[in-house]
Amino acid sequence: MWIRRTTVFFGALILYLICLDRGASFWDCPEYILIAWRLEVGHPPGNPTWQLLANVTSHLGGSAEHAAVMINGLSALCMALASLCLSEIIYIFLRMSLLRRGAVARSSLWASLCAACGALCYAWCDSAIFSAVEAEVYALSALLTALMLLLSLRWAILRRRGRIAAARRVLILTAYLAGLGVGVHELNFLVLPAMALIYFFWGSRRWRRSSYPTAGWSLLLFCIGLTTYLLIPIRAAANPPVNEGDPSTWSAFKNYYGRTQYGSKPLLYGRTPYSKPLLQERLDSATGELLYDRYAIRQYGDGKKEYIYPRELDMWLPRMTSSDPADIEFYEAWAGMTPDEMTPVEASAVVDTAGQQNGRLNPETGGREMRSTFRPTYLQQLRYLAAYQVGYMYMRYLLWNFAGRQNNIHSTGGTETGNFITGIAPLDDAMLGDQSRLSPSMREDNPGYNRYFLIPLAMGVIGIVALCRRRNGRRVCAVVATLFLFTGLLIVVYLNQDPGEPRERDYSFLGSYMAYAIWIGCGLAAIVRSLLAIKTKRPSIGRMLRIVAVTICVGVPLQMLTQTYDDHNRSRMPGADALARTLLEAAPRDAVLLASGDNTIFPLWYGQEVLGLRRDVTVVATPYLSADWYRIQLRRPGEESLPLATPDSVPPGRGAMADRVVEFIRLNNPGRPLLKAGRDGTLTPLDTAK
C-alpha cells in the first residue's frame, strides 16, 4: 500500500515541481495571485475557500516576490494529492469487481499496481499537468472531487464492516468538504450524482430514525463550509484596490454570485441567431405619433434586466444563439445553417403599446408588418451540438489526453493546429490530411506533439467492457460513467459555448479525465486477470506472463510521460511578471493606462498589488467602464495614485460605451498622461491609439 501511495504521489509531484512556473502565468493567474496575497475581490463568482488557503500559502514564501511560486506550488501539491486519492479509488473499485480476493493470486498486489498505473495516467496527462503548474483553482477542485468520491467509498466499506458510527462521521466530513467545495468551484457539485449512486448501491435504502442526527449534522457542516463566502462581502466592504462587482451589499452580492455582469445565454429554451431585441413602441403625447427609439426591456423583481426577443424565433435546446455576423458564418460551416436551408419565419418587431409582441405599424396602410427572417432547424442545432460543442470542444480534449495531440498551437477550427492525433499515420492522414506536409515546428519539434497510439484510450474501453460482464462491475461502471457524464458532456450542454473561444478550455473537464483514468486502471486489471488465468505447468512461462503483465501496466503511464514531460515546462518561461514590469516602468508619473483583455489587465494589477510596482499609475480596465461600480471605484484615490474623474453615467452618443467614458476621462483629467497598454508591452498615447 505505502509503495503505491508513495509512487503515485511523488511521481506526480516531482514532475509538477520540475515544470512549475516560477512567476505568474497569463490569463486569470495574476488576478488569482493578487486576490490571494491581499485578500481582494476577484471576478465573479469568487473562490473564497481557495483564496484563504492560497493566502496562507503565499505568505510562507516570506516576500511578495515569492507569492506566485508558492501558490503555483499549492496547485502542484493539490494535483499530486488528487492523483493519490484517485489511486485509492481505483484500488477500492478493483477489489470490489475485477480483482476480488481469490480472483487471482496476490490480487491485492496486482490491484495496487493497476491502481497506481491508472492514477499516473491521470497525473501525467496533458490537462492535469497544465492545471498543476499554475495559480488556478482547478487543481484544488480536482482534489476535492477525488477526496469526496473516496470518502463515499470509505463510507460504503465501513458500513459493510458494520462500523456504523465511523461511517456516519465520514458522511458528515464529506458534507463539510462539499460546502467548502462551493467556495472553490461549482464543478465540485458534479461529483454528487456519482456519490448518490454509491450510497444507493452499497448503503441502506431505508431511512431509519437513527439517520436523522446524521442528516442534521451533515447539513450543519455543509453550511459551515459555505461560510467561507462571507469573505467576499466583508472584504468588498473594505474597498480594496481590486473589488470587482463591489459585492458589499446583499443585492450586489447576489448579482456577483449569479454572474449577472456577464449576461446570460438560453439553456433549454430561448433565442436563436436571427433574434433581434424588440423595439418598444410608445405614443408621443405631443404629436400623437408612434415612436420606436428604444429597445423593450423586461425587468425582474431582483433588479435584473434583459432585452425582449421575438418569441417566434425561440427554440428548445438552442445551441446557436449568437447574432454576430462572424459567428453566423461559423454556424454555416459547422451546421450548414444557410438561409435556404433554414425555416422561414414571420417574427415580431416591436412590443406594442398594449405590451404585446407585434409587427411594426405602417402609417401608410395602417396595418402591422411582421419581420421576415429565419430560424435554424432542430437538425442544424443538433449538428452544431454534436460537431462543435461535443466533438470539437470536448471529445478533442479527451482524446488529447488519451489518444494523442497534434501540437500545442491554439486551434481555431483548422486541420493544422490543436487537433488530436493517434500517432498512427494512416488514421491521422485520413482525419486531417497529409500530416507530413506540416513544418517540423508544428509536428516533431513542437513540445505538444504527443503520440499515444490509442493505447490509453484502448485500455479504458477494455476496462468498460470488463466491468460490464459482472454485477459488481456493472455497479462500479455505472458510478464511473455518472462521474464521466456529469463532469464532461453535461458541462458541454450547460456551457453552451459560442464560436471563437480565446483559449483552449480542456481544464474544465478534469473530472471527466479522472473518470476515464479509473477505466484505464480497470482495463489494465482485466488484462492482468486474463494473463494470469492462463494455465501452464512450466514455471518459466508463468514468470514470463507475470513479467508481461507488469510491463503492460507500467508501460502505459510511462509511454504517456515520455510524450508529455516537455509540454508544460514553464520553469524558464517569461510570464505576466515581465509584461507588468515593462509597461509600468515605462509609464510617466501619474499616468493613466487603458488596458483591455485579461492578459493586459491582470498582469498590471498583479504588478501593482503584489510586486508593488508604480502604484502612482492608475490602471483602467476598459471592459468594466460601463459598470457604475467600477467608475465609482476609479474616483477614489489609491494607495499612491490620484483619484480619476469619471462620469456618473455613460455619456450619450454613438459608439461603444467604453469609448465614450474614455473620452470623458481624457477631457476631465488634465495633466495626466493617458496611454493605451498593449499586450506586446508597448504604450501608445491616446491621441494616436487606434
Image: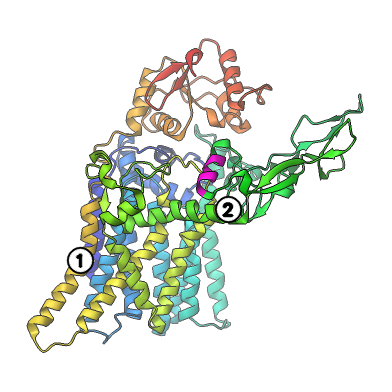
Quarter of image, res 427: bottom left
> Looking at the picture, which amino acid does disc 1 mark?
Val
- The residue carrying mark 2 is 380
Label at residue 554: 1
Screen quadrant of the N terminus: bottom left
Q: Nearer the viewer, mark 1 or mark 2?
A: 2
Residue 166 visible within the image: no
Q: Position of residue 619 (x, y in %)?
A: 48, 25
**Horizontally, is 109 left or right of 276 in the view?**
left
> Looking at the picture, which amino acid does disc 2 mark?
Gln
Q: Position of residue 182 (x, y in %)?
A: 50, 56
- The magenta segment is 328-334
Q: Is residue 573 above or below residue 340?
A: above
Query: Which residue is depicted at the point 36% across and 33% down?
Result: 576
Q: Residues within 10 Å of mark 2 (few under 14, many from 20)?
A: many
Quarter of image, res 483: bottom left
